[in-house]
Image: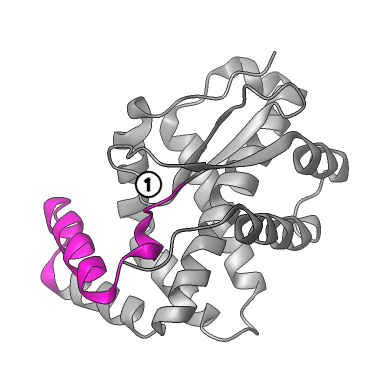
Amino acid sequence: MKPRLTREYLEKLKEDSYIVAKGLLPDKEIMERLNNWACIEIYDQSVAGELFGFLSSSKHPNYPLQVNVLSNNVATYDLDERNKLFSKKFRDAGTNEGMLASIIRTMNSIPEEEFYHIFNQTGMDHEFIGHGYDVLDRAKSSFWNTNPSIAILEQTALNTQLAMAEHRLNQPYWAETVEFIKLTNKFFLENSIKAYDAKPKVTLK
């Protein structure tokens, strides 16, 4: 296993997510509010089905939202552990062997040290920006009352995650990351839906 995550490191990822998202998402007021409202928590408990972390409400009086990052998320696994985990999960989800081989090959084309950073960064993009921006956008409009399906919420976050990865295409190994996200979009959507009930939720007051 690799070193455990630190709050200082995760705060840097949060800052990078914020900088990238400011240039991509339309409502700057929501972006400022999100950056000020969301705190980071290193989550030492396991959550069934989760591979990186999740967004929830916070008990902290100054931060309504909380990005919970699993201390033992997939980025902390060594190569063999990660390949075994993903191979099992994708096979259990019905992924054919050809597609599985493409996914593993793409994932393993990213060096270990880079994968650790990129997986954590794109996970932060997904939870902090993908879900956080969507939550505040819906709270600001009548969409909050439409009770969107879990699938819509997760697909929205995945779309934002992909857009942010594409924004970094000029950086090393982000082209491979974009390919990985596209190859695994369906799996991660279904995986997030299955894991939904095991996670604390967001409730804005």
Query: In the rendering, at what x and y percent does residue 43 appear?
Result: 46, 41
- Residue at left offset 21%, top offset 67%: 81
* Rendered-image quadrant of the N terminus: bottom left
- Compared across the picture, whether 97 is left or right of 170 comes to left
Amino acid type for the residue under numbered disc 1 = Leu
- Compared across the picture, whether 120 is left or right of 65 comes to left
* Disc 1: CA contacts within 10 A as few (<14), some (14-19) or many (>=20): some
- Residue at left offset 73%, top offset 21%: 61
Q: Is residue 103 above or below residue 154?
A: below
* Rendered-image quadrant of the C terminus: top right
Per the picture, the main secondary structure of the magenta-coloured stretch is helix
- Residue at left offset 34%, top offset 61%: 184
Image-quadrant location for residue 33: top right
58 or 121: which is nearer to us? Answer: 58
Q: Which stretch did the figure color magenta?
A: 70-97
Whether residue 20 appears in magenta in the rendering, the answer is no
- Compared across the picture, whether 164 is left or right of 196 comes to right
| Residue denoted by label 1 | 189
Query: In the rendering, at what x and y percent does residue 6 appear?
Result: 56, 56
Query: In the rendering, at what x and y percent does residue 24 appear?
Result: 75, 58
- Residue at left offset 29%, top offset 35%: 194
Query: In the rendering, at what x and y percent does residue 44 appear?
Result: 41, 41
47 or 130: which is nearer to us? Answer: 47
Helix or strand or loop: what does disc 1 sit on? helix
Q: Is residue 93 above or below residue 132?
A: below
Q: Is residue 173 above or below residue 184?
A: below
